[in-house]
Amino acid sequence: MKNIFLEQHIKRLKNKRILIVPLDWGIGHATRCVPIIKLLLSNQNEVIIASSGEALAFLQREFPKQTFLKWNSYNIRYSSSKTQIWAMLSQSPKILWNIYKEHKKLKTIIKRGKIDVIISDNRFGLWNSSVESIYITHQIMIKMPLQLKFFEPLLYSLHKRIIEKYDHCWIPDLEGENNLSGDLSHKYPLPKNSVFIGFLSRFEKKEFTQKSPFQNLILISGPEPQRTIFEKEMIEKFKSKQEETIIVLGKPTNKDSQKIGNITIKSHLKSDDLAFLIQTTPNIFCRSGYSTLMDLSVFGKKATLVPTPGQTEQEYLAERLKTIWQA
């Protein structure tokens, strides 16, 4: 199904040099940029893609003919415990330094690359007064753990100030009751430059005549070490079961495949192959990351949602959606 909201906002961009830079915490921000890049290319724009790590590798696979830049990673690492707040607070100086560096770097890139438009997916520092800048986020407000709930209005105000440095803020969600993000983009007043652009997914629903050879599909995602912890938990949970299970690790830099009992493990799958499995496999187990939820919504699929421990956004979304989404 076409995203008519997104098409309306992209059709005015034509014959431009556009730099798009998704956040590199896992590959979710990169995957949801796929429909944006495709529309930009179909509208005769020249698109330059910048990221790092698995996010960069994923986009290079999806768009092998495009120009790519290696962009500084925030190098965020989650805690292995059930809370992430202290891990994030301890790394906040590093995050702020990287935001400052990417803001300075952007000035050079704009001059050398003759950039007309910059699109930032959740990177705070990629605005510049000399070009049109677009910011993508589904989190206007940032959820905090219960003991730090009183910080939420302050963080919302700070984030709103950052957002309003951009010319536009695109929210990948629907306005009104049928929204997906809940409080994240509907609790507080929106920044004045914000619009809802509908769900962003690299997938389109298709009719498949074949059935999946698997009973269970497990999608692994997110920053380390929680990504690997989830992988190990799922292998332990399913290795003794008789049902055929496939685990997709979300690691496009690897091409490994292995078998553990009735479990098939794939480092990465092509988008068409993964779409087939999501649509035809009876049981899906995954993190409650927002990009994953948007992908599931394309197929109208339910899943067992396992939020990353201590990641308040995922815990909130899993709790909010469990009556609708939980298999």
Image (spheres, rainbow, N blue to C red):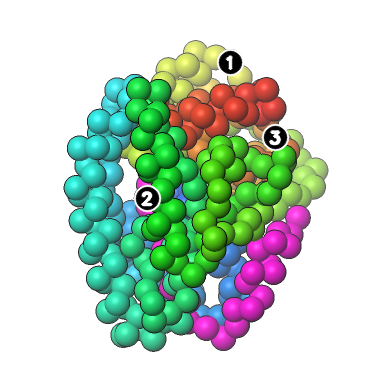
143 left or right of 12? left
Picture residue at 55% right of the left edge, 80% below the top: 45
Check disc 1 and give the amino acid type: Gln
Residue to which mark 1 is pinned: 242
Check disc 3 and give the amino acid type: Lys
Q: Which disc number belongs to residue 318?
A: none
Q: Earlier in the sequence, mark 3 or mark 1?
A: 1
Residue to which mark 2 is pinned: 158
Q: Is residue 6 magenta?
A: yes
- SS assignment at label 3: loop
Residue to which mark 3 is pinned: 301
Q: CA distance from mark 2 to mark 1?
A: 51 Å
Q: Pick whichever, 93 or 147, lies toward us.
A: 147
Q: Residues within 10 Å of mark 1 (few under 14, many from 20)?
A: few
Q: CA distance from mark 2 to mark 3?
A: 36 Å
Query: How many discs appear?
Result: 3
- SS assignment at label 2: helix
Foreground: disc 2 or disc 1: 2
Identify the image quadrant of residue 285. Answer: top right
Q: Earlier in the sequence, mark 2 or mark 1?
A: 2
Q: Which residues are magenta?
A: 1-26
Q: CA distance from mark 3 to mark 1?
A: 23 Å
Q: Residues within 10 Å of mark 2 (few under 14, many from 20)?
A: few
Q: Earlier in the sequence, mark 2 or mark 3?
A: 2
